[in-house]
Image (tube, rainbow, N blue to C red):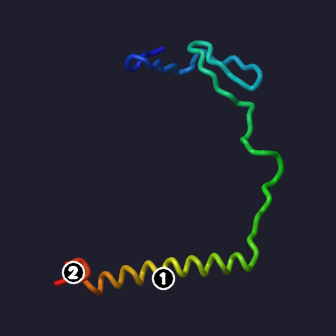
């Protein structure tokens, strides 16, 4: 086993692994690695959720309105130039 720094030991796990109950343990350093587990997901396929055509249309219109209002607001400030930022005389 080699030491790197003060707190970290690097083991190449050359001495082999002991296996039990879906876990393996290095004989030299005691590092464990788990081999007998699956993804943390409930069994079965996920259910596809598709919005209704009405909801899709509402979402599209809402997004278009938000984009258009942002563009118009920025263009108006750009068109006015420094007059929009300077105090009234």
Q: Residue furthest front?
A: 89
Q: Which residue is identified by label 1?
A: 68
Q: How far apart are marks 1 and 2 (CA)?
A: 23 Å
Q: Position of residue 18 (x, y in %)?
A: 69, 17
Q: Where is residue 37 in the image (x, y as percent from the top left)?
A: 74, 34
Q: Position of residue 16 (x, y in %)?
A: 63, 17
Asked where in the image residue 38 lies, by quadrant, the reply is top right
Taking 34 as reference, is 78 above or below it? below
Q: What residue is drawn where x is 74% and y is 71%?
A: 51
Q: Are marks 1 and 2 in contact (CB under 8 Å)?
A: no
Taking 21 as reference, is 43 above or below it? below
Q: What residue is drawn where x is 29% and y is 87%?
A: 79
Mark 2 crowd level (few <14, some 14–19, many ≥20, 10 Å Cα): few
Mark 1 crowd level (few <14, some 14–19, many ≥20, 10 Å Cα): few
Asked where in the image residue 53 lies, by quadrant, the reply is bottom right
Asked where in the image residue 62 lies, by quadrant, the reply is bottom right
**What is the secondary structure assignment of the residue under circle 2?**
helix
**What is the secondary structure assignment of the residue under circle 1?**
helix
Q: How many marks?
A: 2
Q: Which of marks 1 and 2 is in front?
A: 2
Q: What residue is drawn where x is 48% and y is 20%?
A: 10
Q: Position of residue 29 (x, y in %)?
A: 56, 14
Q: Is residue 39 left or right of residue 66?
A: right
Q: What residue is drawn where x is 68% and y is 22%?
A: 24
Numbered label attached to residue 85: none
Numbered label attached to residue 82: 2
Q: In this view, does 51 lie to the left or right of 28?
A: right
Closer to the camera, 53 or 70?
70
- Please report whichever mark, 1 or 2, sits nearer to the chain's N-terminal start: 1
């Amino acid at each position: 086993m080699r030491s790197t720094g003060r707190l970290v030991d690097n083991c190449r796990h050359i001495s082999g692994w002991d296996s039990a109950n879906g876990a393996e343990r290095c004989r030299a350093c005691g590092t464990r690695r788990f081999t007998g587990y699956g993804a943390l997901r409930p069994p079965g396929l996920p259910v596809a959720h598709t919005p209704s055509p009405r909801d899709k249309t509402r979402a599209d219109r809402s997004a278009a309105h938000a984009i258009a209002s942002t563009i118009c607001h920025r263009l108006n400030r750009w068109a006015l130039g420094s007059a929009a930022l300077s105090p009234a005389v």
